[in-house]
Amino acid sequence: MTPSIQVRLESVLHGLRDVIVPALKPEEALAGEQIGLIIAQLDMLVRQLPHADRFHRLCRDDARTTATEILREPAGGPRSLTAAKALAATLGAENDDPHADYLAIAEGIATITTAATADGEAAWRARLDRAVLDFACR
């Protein structure tokens, strides 16, 4: 049986706390500080792990909603329209990995934002800017 990710992380934490930390010499202040930071980060990951899939789905859905708003009547030159077409294709290519979907959609949003600054029509660019700002704030 393969142990879960959570069990593996807890095992690493156990080794760090019970073996590595006691073995550090008191004069190794930087090492002690760094191991404390590492333990804190790993402990946080263990606590967040059960919520990761839900978080990735929320992020993906937010990016999808933002992209859909951006793609409502895009207007501009060839760079903007090509980026809009690519983003629309990304939206249609959802797979079984919400984090990968989020990253792909977010990359498409970044690409279309850059393209719109080059040749996007002003009214559409203003709507795009508002949608991207709202997305970034969330």
Image (tube, grey):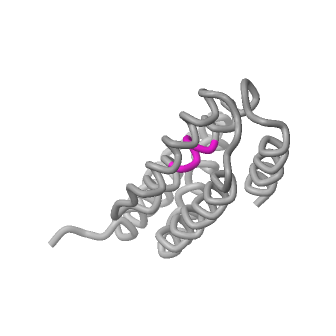
Please say if 120 is above or below 134.
Answer: above
Q: Which residues are magenta?
A: 105-109
Image side of residue 57 versus residue 70, left or right: left
The number of numbered discs placed on residues in the rendered structure image is 0
**Which residue is at the far left?**
1
Residue 115: where, in percent of width, then height?
66, 30
**Residue 87 place in picture, x, y as percent:** 53, 46
| Main SS class of the magenta portion in the image | helix
Tell me where residue 8 appears, x and y as whole percent: 34, 63
Vertical relation: 11 (above or below) 109? below
Q: Quadrant of the N terminus?
A: bottom left
Q: Is residue 130 left or right of residue 9?
A: right
Location of residue 114 in the rendering, given as x and y in whole percent from the top left corner: 68, 30
Q: Name the quadrant of the C terminus.
A: bottom right
The residue under the point 84% across, 37% down is 122
Name the one closer to the observer, 35 or 90. Answer: 90
Please, is residue 138 above or below residue 3 in the view? above
> Residue at left 66%, top 29%?
77
Let me know if residue 106 is in the magenta part: yes
Quadrant of the rendered image containing residue 113: top right
Assess whether residue 129 is covered by the magenta stretch.
Answer: no
